[in-house]
Image (cartoon, helix red, strand yellow):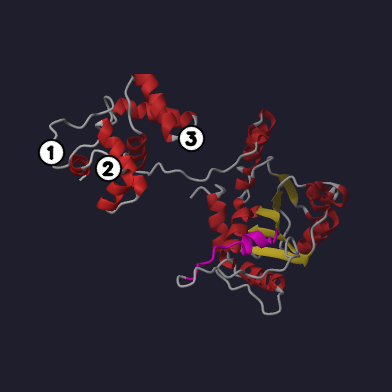
C-alpha cells in the first residue's frame, strides 16, 4: 500500500498512509521507517534462511551443563536466570537462553525447581557456640523418654495473622469491601501453653489472658500447671531462652521445680524454634482460625478470636501432639 501511494504521489505523507491503512499515525511512521531501512519482509515471500541460533546449546542443556547449573544453585540459591546463563557461558562458552534454563529447572527433575519464599535464618544460629549447644542438647534429649518431655511456649494473638487475608473483588463492580478490625487488637491476648504426649496427662494445657506476659505471670502459670498435674514428677520441661523464662521472678523456677517437684528444665539452643513441637501447634491453631468467621457485629473481634482460639486448643489430642513430636524428630518411628 505504501509503495502504491508513493507511485501515485512521491510526496505522500505519513498521515495519508495511516488513513489509507486505517491505522494510527504512530504505527504508520514505524512501518515506513522499517520499510525504508529494509527490515520489513513481505510475508508472502518465501525466505530460505533458516532460524538463526544464538549459539551452541541454545535449545538443549547437556548433563555436564546441568551439573554446572546445580553447582551454581548449591552455592547461591538466589541467582537470577540471567546469572545462570552468564555463569554457564563463562564455564563452557555455550549460550543458553533464560527461558531454556527456567524450563530445565521446572521439568528436568522429579521436583520442580521453582522459586519459593526463603526462610530467613539469623546468622548467629550457626555460630560455633550455638552449634556446640545444639550438639549438647541432642546428646541430652536422646537419653530421655519422649513420653516424659513437655514443651512450653507463649503465643500472642496477632491481628495480622488472623485478619490480613485476601478478599475477592466484585466481578461486576470491581469493588473490594474492607473488613473492620479493632485498632487495639494487636497482642490483646497472650497464651502460655504446655504440650505432651504422655497419656496420663492432658495433651495440651494453656492459660489465655489479656495483656502481655512477664516473668511473674510465667512462673505462676507453670506452678499452676504443676498443681493441675499437667506437669508431674519425672517430667522434663523444654523451653526457649526468652528472658521471662529464667530472669527476675523466673530465676528461681528451675530450682523450685527440681527440688520440690522432681521436674527438670532444659533450654533449647538459641534460634531453634524448629525443635519445639508447640510451635507447630500454634501454626495449626492459626490456620484453623483463618477459616472461622471472626467478624463481630459489635466490633469485638478480639474476644471472638480468643473464644475461637480456646476452642481449637481444647480440641488438640495426643495424636495431634505426637505428630508434631514426630516432625521435630523426637520419635524414631
Asked if residue 122 lies left or right of residue 14, the reply is right
Q: Which sits earlier in the primary sequence, circle 2 or circle 3?
A: 2
* Residue placed most toward the observer, 64 or 327: 64
Q: Which sits earlier in the primary sequence, circle 2 or circle 1?
A: 2
Q: Which residue is mark 1?
A: 45
Instruction: Measuring from the top left, give residue 90's x and y in whole percent.
Output: 39, 20
Secondary element under disc 1, as helix, strand or loop, is loop
Q: CA distance from mark 2 to mark 1?
A: 26 Å
Secondary element under disc 3, as helix, strand or loop, is loop
Instruction: Measuring from the top left, give residue 147's x and y in whole percent.
Output: 61, 55
Q: Which residue is mark 2?
A: 12
Q: CA distance from mark 2 to mark 3?
A: 58 Å
Instruction: Measuring from the top left, give residue 324's x and y in whole percent.
Output: 56, 55
Q: CA distance from mark 1 to mark 3?
A: 48 Å
Q: Main secondary structure of the magenta part?
A: loop
- Residue drawn at the location 68% of the way across and 43% of the way down: 268
Q: Residues within 10 Å of mark 1 (few under 14, many from 20)?
A: few
Q: Which residue is mark 3?
A: 77
Q: Residue furthest bottom?
A: 297
Question: Which region is colored magenta?
Answer: 156-170
Mark 2 vs mark 3: give the one in front: 2
Q: Which sits earlier in the primary sequence, circle 1 or circle 3?
A: 1
Mark 2 vs mark 1: give the one in front: 2
The answer to whether residue 228 is visible is no
Amino acid at each position: 500500500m505504501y509503495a502504491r501511494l508513493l507511485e501515485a504521489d512521491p510526496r505522500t505523507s505519513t498521515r495519508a498512509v495511516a488513513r489509507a491503512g486505517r491505522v494510527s499515525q504512530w504505527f504508520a511512521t514505524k512501518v515506513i521507517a522499517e520499510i525504508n531501512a529494509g527490515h520489513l519482509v513481505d510475508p508472502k515471500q518465501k525466505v530460505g534462511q533458516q532460524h538463526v541460533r544464538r549459539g551452541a546449546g541454545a535449545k538443549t542443556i547437556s548433563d555436564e551443563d546441568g551439573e554446572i547449573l546445580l553447582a551454581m544453585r548449591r552455592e547461591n540459591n538466589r541467582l537470577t536466570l540471567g546469572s545462570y546463563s552468564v555463569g554457564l557461558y563463562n564455564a563452557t562458552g555455550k549460550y543458553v537462553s533464560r527461558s531454556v534454563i527456567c524450563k530445565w529447572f521446572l521439568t528436568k527433575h522429579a521436583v520442580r525447581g521453582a522459586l519459593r519464599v526463603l526462610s530467613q535464618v539469623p546468622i548467629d544460629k550457626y555460630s560455633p557456640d550455638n552449634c556446640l549447644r545444639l550438639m549438647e542438647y541432642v546428646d541430652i534429649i536422646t537419653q530421655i523418654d519422649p513420653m516424659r518431655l513437655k514443651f512450653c511456649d507463649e503465643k500472642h494473638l496477632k491481628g495480622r495473622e488472623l485478619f490480613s487475608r485476601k478478599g475477592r473483588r466484585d466481578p461486576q463492580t470491581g469493588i473490594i469491601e474492607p473488613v473492620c478490625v479493632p485498632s487495639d487488637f494487636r497482642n490483646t491476648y497472650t497464651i502460655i501453653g504446655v504440650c505432651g504426649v504422655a497419656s496420663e496427662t492432658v495433651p495440651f494445657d494453656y492459660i489465655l489472658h489479656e495483656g502481655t506476659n512477664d516473668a511473674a505471670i510465667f512462673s505462676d502459670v507453670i506452678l499452676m500447671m504443676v498443681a493441675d498435674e499437667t506437669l508431674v514428677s519425672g517430667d522434663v520441661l523444654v523451653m526457649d531462652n526468652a528472658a521471662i523464662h529464667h530472669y527476675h521472678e523466673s530465676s528461681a523456677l528451675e530450682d523450685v521445680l527440681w527440688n520440690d517437684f522432681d521436674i527438670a528444665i532444659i533450654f533449647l539452643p538459641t534460634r531453634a524454634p524448629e525443635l519445639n513441637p508447640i510451635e507447630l501447634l500454634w501454626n495449626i491453631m492459626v490456620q484453623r482460625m483463618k477459616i472461622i468467621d471472626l467478624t463481630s457485629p459489635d466490633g469485638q473481634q478480639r474476644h471472638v478470636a480468643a473464644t475461637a482460639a480456646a476452642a481449637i486448643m481444647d480440641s488438640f489430642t495426643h495424636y495431634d501432639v505426637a505428630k508434631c513430636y514426630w516432625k521435630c524428630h523426637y520419635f524414631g518411628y
